[in-house]
Image (spheres, helix red, strand yellow):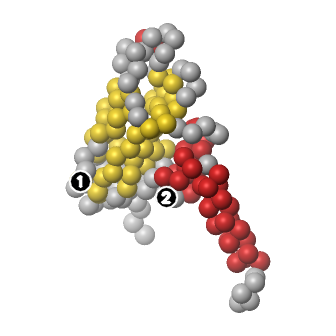
Amino acid sequence: MNKYSPLRRRYLSIVSLFGLGVWLHPSLSFAKKPEALEAIANIVGSQVPKDGRVKLVIPPLVENGNLVVLKVSVESPMTAQDYVKAIHVIAEGNPLPNIFSAFLTPRSGTANITTRVRLAETQRVWAIAQMSDGSFWQGYADTLVTLSACTEAI
């Protein structure tokens, strides 16, 4: 194979674009896989999520990735003028990284969610809160998964 083949050039240009995209949009540098990067970009658009206000609680060690308890809470008064519109959870190691999105209103009372999710591997899980003023806030937690879920046997 020629070292200047079109396939190699295309691969190198795609890899370069991902590197350039992270440099131009540093908030996306936390995602390890292109699928997670794309899922986060679809949520926040051109905005940069701020750190804080979002607390994600997940066990640091999980024996089985099929049922992992996940809790997300967002600091918000939940009034008609200031409330959490949506909470998005991204698992960067899953084949489909956007685990779920929960949509809230001021009538929700609090911005607290507890659920069970499936995790494919050891990874970082992100929670992104979209506020009523259009801002985005983020929090994350790392977890070590010993028995993976979301995988198919070949």
Q: Looking at the picture, how far across and down is residue 80, in whole percent?
A: 49, 9
What residue is rendered at 57% in x and 39% in y?
48
Mark found first going from the N terminus, 2 or 1? 2
Left/right placement of residue 45 relative to residue 116 reads right
Q: Looking at the picture, how far across and down is residue 118, in whole percent?
A: 35, 48
Q: Looking at the picture, how far across and down is residue 137, in whole percent?
A: 47, 33
Q: Marks 2 and 1: which is nearer the front?
A: 2
Residue nearer the viewer, 86 or 148: 86
Q: Quadrant of the C terminus?
A: bottom left
Left/right placement of residue 131 relative to residue 3 reads left
What residue is rendered at 29% in x and 57% in y?
145
Q: Is residue 141 above or below residue 107?
A: below
Instruction: Identify the element where label 2 is drawn.
Output: loop
Residue nearer the viewer, 48 or 85: 48
The furthest residue to the bottom: 1
What residue is rendered at 75% in x and 82% in y?
5
Three-letter code for the amino acid on which mark 2 is drawn: Lys
Question: Which dot marks residue 61?
Answer: 1
Left/right placement of residue 75 relative to residue 59 reads right
Q: Looking at the picture, how far across and down is residue 85, in whole percent?
A: 50, 23
Instruction: Identify the element where label 1 is drawn.
Output: strand
Residue nearer the viewer, 50 or 142: 50
Q: Is residue 65 above or below residue 3?
A: above
Three-letter code for the amino acid on which mark 1 is drawn: Leu
What residue is rendered at 37% in x and 14% in y?
109
Residue linked to disc 2: 32
Image quarter of residue 12? bottom right
Question: Is residue 24 something that shows in the picture?
Answer: yes
Residue nearer the viewer, 78 or 86: 78
Q: Are marks 2 and 1 in contact (CB under 8 Å)?
A: no
**Tally of marks:** 2
